[in-house]
Amino acid sequence: MTTTTKPPPLNRLRKQWREGRPTFGAIATIPSIQTVQIMARSGLDWIIIDLEHGPIEMGSAHAMITATSGTPCVPLARIAANEPWLAKAPMDIGALGINFPMICSRQDAEKAVRSVRYPPRGERLWGPFHAPFRWGVSMPDYIASADDDMICMITIEHVEAVNRIDEIMATPGIDVAVIGPGDLATSIGKCGRADDPEVLALMARAETGILKSGVPIGGVARSAEQANQMIDRGYLALALGFDWSLFARGIAASFEGIKR
């Protein structure tokens, strides 16, 4: 009798989160293979290719995803809207997770979950022509583990999402929920004021709701001190910055102590 064994998972993030181990990443907005190669080899656990705000088209995204090859770094992609057709191509070229913006209701969350998994668990359409090459597996092996490998990352970044946080987080299939302070501030008319007390209060409410659900929580850490505080509160997915901000901070640090 022939037995079929399921291939080992390609994505290590879910295992790390189950074990309570924090992971660290960054958001790539510059359409550059070289930048991603440097980032992926610098200790990051994941990189989000930004297809929402960055000037990155799909050909560049494919090259950037491929540039993570040979490293433990897992490539994810942030799409411009919670639409299945936007999630489809990044997955098919090798991203092992999709970051869905502006999830404001359970209906939004269910739509995101369905987008990243094949029937009967979801509604992802078949066509992963290039993803198996990125991961060095056969097409059958990719398909066999795709549903479990793909990360559904939702972003809580609107006041309405905070008001509905319990119903959103009760949605089965969410793998990680991240809090977006920039758009959250903008949603209450405080654009660019993420440290405003009202915004911080909303973030605290979102944090409580996510932690209560048991779903891994993620957010932005702008310093080592802030990252450690967030880890102590239970954060498991910490974005350390954008490529451009890390670049700028590195240049600024190079000037420290130099007489100018």
Image (cartoon, helix red, strand yellow):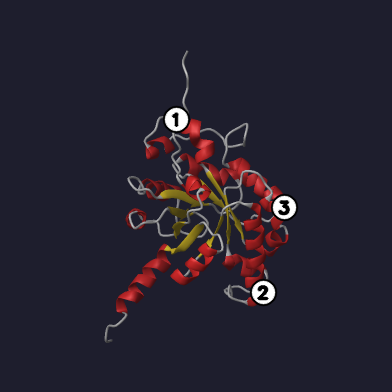
Give amino acid for label 3. Answer: Glu
Q: Which residue is mark 2?
A: 198
Residue at the location (40% across, 67% down)? 246
The residue at the far top in this view is: 1
* Residue 193 rendering spot, x and y as whole percentages: 59, 75
Residue 223 seen in this snapshot: no
Specify which label sits upstream in the sequence, 2 or 3.
3
Choose top left, top right, bottom left or bottom right for residue 255: bottom left
Q: Which residue is mark 1?
A: 141
* Residue 45 rendering spot, x and y as whole percentages: 42, 53
Specify which label sits upstream in the sequence, 1 or 3.
1
Indicate whether 258 appears above or below 133. Answer: below
Residue 31 seen in this snapshot: yes
Residue 162 left/right relative to 99: right
Give amino acid for label 2. Answer: Glu
Q: How many marks?
A: 3
**In terms of depth relative to the viewer, which is nearer, 58 or 146?**
146
Q: Which residue is mark 3?
A: 167
Task: Give the class, few, some or many, for how many residues have Cα within 10 Å of label 1's Cα (few <14, many ≥20).
Answer: some
**In terms of depth relative to the viewer, which is nearer, 30 or 240?**
240
